[in-house]
Image (tube, rainbow, N blue to C red):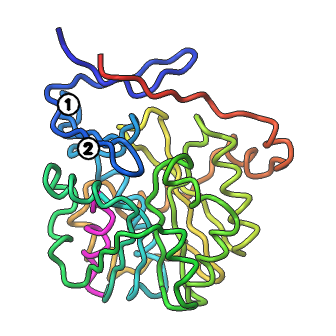
C-alpha cells in the first residue's frame, strides 16, 4: 500500500503527495520538520505538516520572490533575508554580482541543517559564498534592534502567519522593516494566496499600504502549494517595479527556469477579483474567515 502525505483537509478538498520514503523527521523548538521523497516533486520539505518547497518546483517560488525585486530596485548591494532557511532565496540573490552582502536571519537552525544535509540542491553554492552571513535568530527581534537605513533590499521568506511566522505579518513589523531600508530600498515578501486566503492577503496589503507609499502585489504559480495562484508583494517609499535594469535581466535570465522580462511584466497585472480585495473595507474583512486548513498525518 502506498504512503501518502495529506497536507491539508478542507471542507471540499483533500490534497496529498505519494511518498516514496520518509527521509527526515524532527520536532524542533519551533515546529515539526519533515523531509520526504515524493513521486511528483522529488524531495520535499514540510513544516508543521504543510509543504514549503521541493527539488523539482522550488524555482517558481524562489525566482518569483527574488528577481522581480532585484531586477528593478535602484540598488541591490546590501540584502537582508528573514526566514528562508532552505537556502533557495539566498541562492538566487547571490547570483547577482552587484550584491555585496546578504544577511540571512532564520529562527530555526534545525531547518537550515536539515536542508543542507538532505536538500543541498535548494541552497546550492549559497552556503559556501563568503557574502552570506547566516544568523540563527528571531527575525522580529533582529529587525527591532538593527540600525536604521542600512539595507537596499529586505526579503521576507516566511511560512504562513501561524507558528514561527506570525510576527512577520503585522503593521508594526513592516514599519520596522521600512526603518531599516534606505530611502530607495525595497521590501518584498510572500503574501499568501488571494484565492484560498483572501482575508490574509488583503490584510497584508492594507497593512503594507499604511506604512509604504508604493505597494505592488504580484502573482504566479507555486505547484506544491494547493491554491492555484500565489502572491508576493513589492513595497517601497520611492521605488517601483515597472522599469527593469537591462544589464541585470540579461545576466540573470539565462540561468532562470521561470523568470524573464515578459513574465516580470505579467506578474504585476492585477485580476479584477484581487482589485476587489484591495479596495475592501478592513473592518469588513475582520468579520470574514479564510478557508480552514488542517494538517493531516501520513497515511
Using the image, tell me which numbered label, if any, was put on residue 87. none
Nearer to the camera, 279 or 149: 149
Name the residue that disc number 1 marks.
38
Q: Is residue 178 left or right of residue 261?
A: right
- The residue shown at (49%, 41%) is 229
> Which of the marked residues, 2 or 1, is nearer the chain's N terminus?
1
Which residue sits at x=21%, y=25%? 19
Residue 15 rendering spot, x and y as whole percentages: 40, 22
**Which span is picked out in magenta?**
86-98
Is 18 on the left-hand or right-hand side of 138? left
Rendered location of residue 2, percent (x, y): 19, 13
Q: Is residue 92 magenta?
A: yes
Picture quadrant of residue 81: bottom left
Mark 2 vs 1: CB contact within 8 A = yes
> Dot 1 lies on which element?
strand
Q: Position of residue 278 (x, y in %)?
A: 74, 52
Residue placed under numbered mark 2 in the picture = 54
Amino acid at each position: 500500500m502506498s504512503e501518502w502525505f495529506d497536507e491539508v483537509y478542507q471542507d471540499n478538498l483533500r490534497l496529498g503527495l505519494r511518498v516514496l520514503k520518509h527521509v527526515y523527521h524532527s520536532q524542533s523548538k519551533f515546529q515539526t520538520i519533515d523531509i520526504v521523497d515524493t513521486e511528483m516533486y522529488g524531495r520535499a520539505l514540510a513544516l508543521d505538516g504543510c509543504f514549503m518547497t521541493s527539488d523539482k518546483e522550488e524555482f517558481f517560488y524562489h525566482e518569483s520572490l527574488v528577481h522581480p525585486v532585484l531586477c528593478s530596485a535602484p540598488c541591490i548591494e546590501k540584502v537582508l533575508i528573514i526566514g528562508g532557511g532552505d537556502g533557495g532565496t539566498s541562492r538566487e540573490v547571490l547570483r547577482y554580482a552587484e550584491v555585496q552582502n546578504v544577511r540571512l536571519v532564520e529562527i530555526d537552525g534545525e531547518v537550515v541543517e536539515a536542508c543542507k544535509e538532505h536538500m543541498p540542491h535548494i541552497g546550492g553554492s549559497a552556503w559556501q559564498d563568503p557574502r552570506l552571513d547566516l544568523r540563527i535568530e528571531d527575525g522580529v527581534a533582529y529587525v527591532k534592534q538593527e540600525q536604521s537605513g542600512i539595507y537596499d533590499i529586505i526579503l521576507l521568506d516566511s511560512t504562513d502567519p501561524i507558528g514561527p511566522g506570525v510576527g512577520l505579518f503585522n503593521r508594526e513589523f513592516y514599519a520596522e522593516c521600512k526603518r531599516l531600508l534606505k530611502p530607495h530600498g525595497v521590501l518584498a515578501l510572500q503574501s499568501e494566496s488571494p484565492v484560498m486566503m483572501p482575508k490574509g492577503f488583503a490584510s497584508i496589503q492594507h497593512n503594507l499600504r499604511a506604512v509604504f507609499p508604493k505597494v505592488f502585489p504580484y502573482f504566479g504559480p507555486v505547484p506544491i502549494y494547493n491554491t492555484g495562484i500565489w502572491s508576493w508583494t513589492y513595497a517601497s517609499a520611492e521605488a517601483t517595479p515597472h522599469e527593469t535594469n537591462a544589464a541585470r535581466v540579461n545576466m540573470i535570465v539565462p540561468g532562470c527556469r521561470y523568470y524573464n522580462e515578459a513574465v516580470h511584466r505579467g506578474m504585476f497585472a492585477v485580476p479584477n477579483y484581487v482589485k476587489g480585495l484591495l479596495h475592501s473595507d478592513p473592518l469588513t474583512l475582520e468579520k470574514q474567515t479564510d478557508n480552514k486548513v488542517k494538517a493531516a498525518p501520513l497515511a
